[in-house]
Amino acid sequence: MGTRRGADFSEKLASSPTRRSRQRLPRVWRRYCVWGEILAEHEGGKTEEILDRQFRCGFAGLAAKDLSCILLAYEPVWAIGTGHTAEPEIAGEVHGFLRRRAAKALADQASALRILYGGSVRPDNIKRSMAQEEIDGALVGARV
């Protein structure tokens, strides 16, 4: 479950980066970037490779000063609507990777980037996820 959405995203990502990411963001607007990998990529150990590609395409042309207007969420596609969730320690490692990637690309401004976890967040797993140092919050929602 959830794999088609990720495949659609990967196809779109490969063909054309969004124009919106290249536009200057008004300081009062918040934009959400939701990134993640499908199950085959996760099981194949390609999570960082996929997220690196999503980072490069999603933030192409974005000025470092605009990071305060961005909320980035790691939402593993394989967890969407399946009831599965990344173990908090694994989600923390992925968030750490994204934070290091941001620091590499955006230097001092990277600390302004907020990274949320959005993979099947529920009352029974929220405390363990929020205990991870690299996770700034949760993107909570449900498929309707």
Image (cartoon, helix red, strand yellow):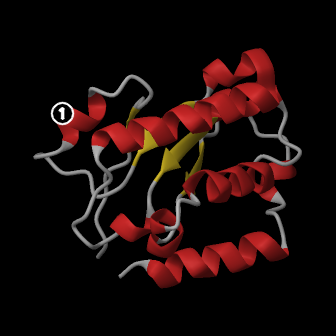
Residue at 25% over, 64% down? 84
Q: Please tell me in which quadrant of the rendered image residue 66 appears.
A: top right
Location of the N terminus (image quadrant): bottom left
Callout 1, which amino acid? Lys
> Residue 105 location in percent, x, y?
80, 32
Whether residue 27 is visible, yes or no, is no
Residue at 45% over, 56% down? 75
Q: Is residue 36 left or right of residue 125?
A: right
Residue at 39% over, 69% down? 78
Q: Residue furthest front?
A: 44
Q: Residue furthest left?
A: 124
Whether residue 135 is visible, yes or no, is yes
> Residue 36 location in percent, x, y?
53, 59
> Residue 103 location in percent, x, y?
71, 25
Q: Is residue 37 left or right of residue 31?
A: left
Residue at 28% over, 37% down? 129
Q: Is residue 86 above or below residue 112?
A: below
Q: Compare residues 42 and 54 and report the one nearer the observer.
A: 42
Q: Is residue 7 above or below residue 140?
A: below
Q: Is residue 80 above or below residue 119?
A: below
Label 1: state its secondary structure: helix
- For label 1, the residue is 127
